[in-house]
Amino acid sequence: MADTMPSYIGRSVVRREDNRLLKGAGTFVGDMKLEGMVHVAIVRSQQAHARINSVDLEAARNADGVVLALAGAELKDVLPPISGMQVAAPKGWRDGMDPHIDIPDQTLVPYDKLRYVGEPYALVVAGDRYMAEDAAELIEGDFDPLPPIASAEAALDAEALVHDHLPGNIAATLHAKKGEGEAALEAAPHRLKRRYYHHRYAAMPMECRGVVAEYDSRTDSITVWSSTQVVHWVRREVANALDMPEERVRVVAPDVGGGFGGKGHVYPEDILIAYLAKRLDRPVKWLEDRHEHLLNAAHSRDNLFDIEVGYDDDGRISVVKNYFLVDSGAYSPVGAAIAGNSIAHFMGPYDIPHYEADCKVMMTNRTPNAPYRGAGRPEVAFAMERSIDLIANELGLDPAEVRFRNMIQPEQMPYAVGLPYRDGVMIEYDSGDYPEALRKALDGIGGLDEFRSRQKAALAEGRYLGLGLGCYVEGTGIGPFEGATVKIDSSGKVMVATGACPQGQGHETAFAQVAADIWNVPIEDVVVTLADTSHVTMGYGTIASRSAVTASGAIKDSSDKVKEKVFAIAANVLEASESDLELRNGSVGVKGVPEMSMTLKEVARAALPGWIHQRPEGIEAGLEGTAYYEPPTVTWAYAANAAIVEIDAQTGVVKIENYVEVHDAGTLINPGIADGQVRGGLVQGIGGGLFEELFYDEHGQLMTGSFMDYLLPTASDIPPINVIHTETPSPRNSFGFKGLGEGGAIAPPVVIANAVCDALKSFGAELNSTPVRAEQILNIIDAGVAAAE
Amino acid sequence: MKPPLLDILTPSSLAEALSLLSEHGDEARPLAGGQSLVPLLNFRMSRPAILIDLNQIADLAYIKDAGDYIAIGAMTRERSIEDSDLVRKEAPLLQEATTQIAHLPIRNRGTIGGSLANADPAAEYPAVVLALECELVVQSVRGERRIKAAAFFEDVLTTALEPDELLTEIIVPKAPSGSSSAFVEIARRHGDFALAGIAAQITFANSAPTDVRLAVCGAGTTASRLTAAEEIIQRDGVGPEAIKAASEAAASAVDPMSDLHASADYRRRLTGVMIGQAVEKAAQRAGVIS
Ligand SMILES: Cc1cc2nc3c(=O)[nH]c(=O)nc-3n(C[C@H](O)[C@H](O)[C@H](O)COP(=O)(O)OP(=O)(O)OC[C@H]3O[C@@H](n4cnc5c(N)ncnc54)[C@H](O)[C@@H]3O)c2cc1C
C-alpha cells in the first residue's frame, strides 16, 4: 500500500459523533415520538420472594386513557421465556471447567411467583406515561410472602428455593485446575487463608434503558429501537418470541447514553414492547426511569471468596486455591460467563504453577447479576492483589517487590496459563512487559523509595499516607465473531457497517480511521453505520472490550473481498497487471505511474451490473463484501495501577492524592478515545471502591432505590488521574489491537483498599471487603489504638 | 416516576398566594425552588392536589439591609445569598454555609424559604438560623407571626408553620463586631447533605469568647444548639483542652439516627470532630489562635 495518505490509526482524530452529541442533537430512544404512540408503565414487585395468587387489573383497565392492562397470567401462553443461555459455552471451555450449568430461563412477566424486588408482574399501556403510572397504581396483587434468600451464602443451605428445579439454589458449578493444588499447598512453607467480599454495584449509564417498537402490518415486520449494546441478540429473541423471521425484525440502537455491560443482554422489556406494538398495531414506548434502573437493570459484582495461597520465604507464590460464590440474583442472563472470567483471570500477571478454582453461581432473591465493566475481573483482582499485599506484610517485604518477584517476565511471552478461556481455547498471554508497567506506575507516583521516605516523614507528624498497587491482565476482543459489510457505491464513498453497538465509545470515528487506512482514502470518505440489524446480516455487539479487535477484523476481511474486485476491475480498465496496482488517496493506480489511475468512484461505476460495465470475465457485479471475523482467541491487555491516599484519622475519610494507571492495549486506534475509556473506567472503579453500593437488607429489600442513597462519584470526588499508555502490539491480529473498554474499572477498589491498609499499617489494618468506608476505617484505627494500649 | 395529576396555581402577589393557601388548606403545597418537593412528587410520596407556585411573586425575593439586621425574602435563591456582598460582610456564617449546600445548579433554584420550611435535619440553613438567632416571619390571611428560630423546627421535616401559613422573610441579625464564625461539615461526597455539620458563631472580647453559639445539623431529628459545648467554650476559652472537652460534650449531647450512610455512633463522633474544627476555624479567623 503506497504511503500517499497519512495513517489515521494512532491519531487522536476528533470524534465525529461529538458534533451532534455535544450540541444536544443526538437522538436517544427517549427522544423518539411516533404518530399514535402509546406508553407503558410496568408494575414491579416490592417483595423479594412471594407466591402470586392473583393480580386485579379491573380498576386499571377502567382508568383514564388506558389502552391495555396485562399481568403475567395473560402472557404466559403467548410469550416464551428468555433462554437462560444468551451466551453459548463452547466445548473446549466445558471440557476444561467440568461445569454443571443449569441457568433458569426468565419468564418475561411472572405469573406464579416473584423472585426479586423490581421484577415485573403487570403492565399498563396508556395514552401517556402519566396516565399509565396513575393506572399502574390501581393494580393490586394478592401475594403470599415466601422466605427471602437474601445472600449467596444463605442460599447454599436455605430450605426455600428461588427456582424449584434448582436444589441448593445452585445454577452452575465450575471447576478449574492447573498443576497439583493440594500437594503444592502441603509443600508450601507459608500459607495465607482469607475471605474476601466484593460488593454489589452496577453500571449507572446516564441514559437508563428504553424501548420503542413499531409494527407494520402491510409487510408483517417490526422495528425495535432499544437502548442496547446487542441489537442482533435483541433481534434473535424478538423474532423467536413473536415467531417471526429475523428478516422481518429490524433492531436499531440509536444514540445510546452509556451501557457499560448493563445493556449487554436482552431484557424482558425488549420483547414485551415489541409484542405490544404488534398486538396493538401502534407504536409503543417504554422508558426505564432511574428508580426502575436501580431495581431492575442488571446488578453486578457481589462475589464471596475463600482463598488459600501457598508461598515461600521470598514471597514467591506456588499455589492459589480459589473457592467462590457468585450472588447471581434471581436469574443469570449471561449464564456462567462472569464466573468463567473470574476463574480465568485470577492469577493475573503472575507466574503461579498451581491453581485450583471452584465456583458456584448462586440464585438469590436479588436483582439478576450480569456483566458490568470488568465482568468478573475486579472481583478476582481484589482477592489476588489483597493477598499479595498481605503476603508482603507477613514477610516484611514491600508489596511492590512481591509483585516483581511473581510477575511473568517479558521473555516468557507468549505465556501459557494452563486453563481454558471462555472461548474454549487454552489461555496464552500474547505479548507484554508486566514488570515494566509496574515500574512505570511507580515512577508515575514519584518513585517507590521517594514515597516510602515521604510516608515515614508524614507518619512522624501523625499523618497517614499509603500506597496502593493493583495489577491485572484482561482477555479482550473475545469472539465468537463480529460481522461487517463494506460497500463502495457509485458515489465512491466507502460504506462500512458492523454489528458493533457503541454507547459513547466513539466507534463511528474509530472505525472510520480503520477503514480509511485499509482503503487509503480520506477519512471524510468513510461512512459508518452501526447498531442497525438491517445493515449487517449477522452481528454480535459491543460488550466485553471486544469491538476494536473484532469489528476491525471484520472490516478488514470484508474489505479484502471487495479489494480483490476493485483491483481486478481497475486492472481491466487500466490495462495493467493487478500486481502493479496500489490504493492511493481514494484511487487505484499503477505503482510509479501517477497519471495512470482511476478513482474508487470510477471503479464502482465500472463494477455496476448492466450493459456498460467494465468488469473482466468472471468478476461479479457490485463492490460489496460481507465477512464474519472469528478471532483465533482473545488478546491480552494489561495494566499496573498505583495510587497514594491520605487518611484523616479523625474522620476516617480517604483522600486519593494521585492515581496512576499504566495501560497497554496494543496498538491504539485513537489515543484520545483510549484515554477517555481508561479514565471513565477508573472513575467507575473509584465509585465502586468508595461510594457505590446496592444495599439489601436481610429481607431482600433493596435499600438504594434512588441517587439519594446510591452514591455515584461526581467530578468533585475524583482525584487527579494520570493514564500512561504503552503499546505492545498483539500478534493475534493484523493491526496489533487489544481491547480496552473495561480495563480502567478493574483495579481501583483493590488499589484503594491496599492503599488504606498501607497507610494504617501501624494499626494492623486489614480491609478485605468493599466498598471502603470512612466509618470502617475509623473502627480500624480505634481497634488498633485499643490493641496498642 | 411521574407525579399524579395536579393543578398548579400561579399567584402573582403574596396576598393572592395567602388567600389561595387558606382556601385550599391541606390540599395544597407551596412550590418554591422545587429541589426538595419535586422529587417527592415524582416518587408520589407527597400528593397534593394543588401546587401554589411562589415563583411569580417578585417581591418575595430580596436581600435588604435593615439597619441592625438583614431581611431576606423567602424566595431568595441560595445562589443569590452566596453571591451577596451584604451577606458576606454582615452574616458571613450564612454565606459560608450556603456554599456547602448541594451543587451550583441546585442552589440556582433552591430558596432559603424552601430549605427552612422543608426542615431537613441535615440541611445547613436550620443550623445557621439557630446559631444566628434569626427570626422567621410567617404570614397567613389571619395575619403575621414572628417565630424565633429556636421555636421553628419541631421534628424531621416538621416546623411550626400552620398549613395556611407561608414563610415570607428571614430576619438575620448582623454579626456583632468582634465576632467570628465558621461553618464546617462532613458528607460522604462533596455536596451531599451533611453527616454532621456545625455552625459556629462566636464573639470575642480581648481574645476571650463572650458569646458562643454552636448549632449542629445532621445529627438528630432537627438541627439544634449544643449548649453544653457552648458553655465550655465560653467558660474555658478556645485552647486545645477546652475544644476537646467541648467536642466530647457535643458528641454526647446529640442523638443522631443511623442510616445507610452512617451509623448513629459515627455521626456522634463526627459531631465532636466538627465542633473542634469549627471552633478552631472561628478562633483563627478572629485572630485569637494561630
Ligand atoms: C441533589 C440535591 C442535593 C441537595 N443537597 C442539599 C444540601 O446539601 N443541603 C441542603 O440544605 N439542601 C440540599 N438540597 C435541597 C435544596 O437546598 C432545596 O432547594 C431546599 O431544601 C428546598 O428549597 P426549595 O426552594 O427547592 O423548596 P421546594 O422544594 O420548592 O419546597 C420544599 C418544601 O418547603 C415548602 N415551602 C417552600 N417554600 C415555602 C414557603 N415560603 N413557606 C412555606 N412552605 C414552603 C414546600 O411546600 C415543600 O414542602 C439538595 C437538593 C438536591 C436536589
Image (cartoon, coloured by chain):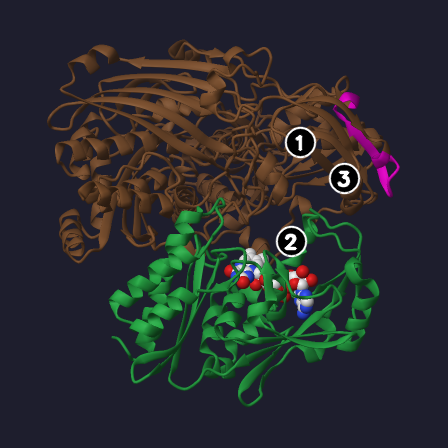
Q: Which residue is mark 3?
A: A137
Q: Chain ID for label 2?
A: B
Q: Chain ID for label 1?
A: A
Q: Is residue A530 visible?
A: no
Q: Which residue is mark 1?
A: A45
What is the three-letter code of the residue carrying label 1?
A: Ser
* Residue B142 vs residue B43, the one in the foreground: B142
* Residue span colored magenta: A59-74
CA separation, marks 3 and 2? 18 Å
**Any magenta on residue A121?**
no
**Chain (brown):** A
Q: Chain ID for label 3?
A: A
- Residue A245 shown left or right of residue A723 in the figure: right
What is the three-letter code of the residue carrying label 3?
A: Glu
Q: How many marks?
A: 3
Q: Earlier in the sequence, mark 1 or mark 3?
A: 1
**Chain (green):** B
Name the residue: 20% across, 34% down.
Answer: A403
- Disc 3 on helix, strand or loop? loop
Q: Is residue A748 visible?
A: yes
Q: Which residue is mark 2?
A: B39
Name the residue: 39% across, 13% down.
Answer: A97
Queried on whether the Cβ of the residue with tag 3 lies below 8 angstroms from ligand 1, the answer reads no
- Disc 1 on helix, strand or loop? loop
Queried on whether the Cβ of the residue with tag 2 lies below 8 angstroms from ligand 1, the answer reads yes
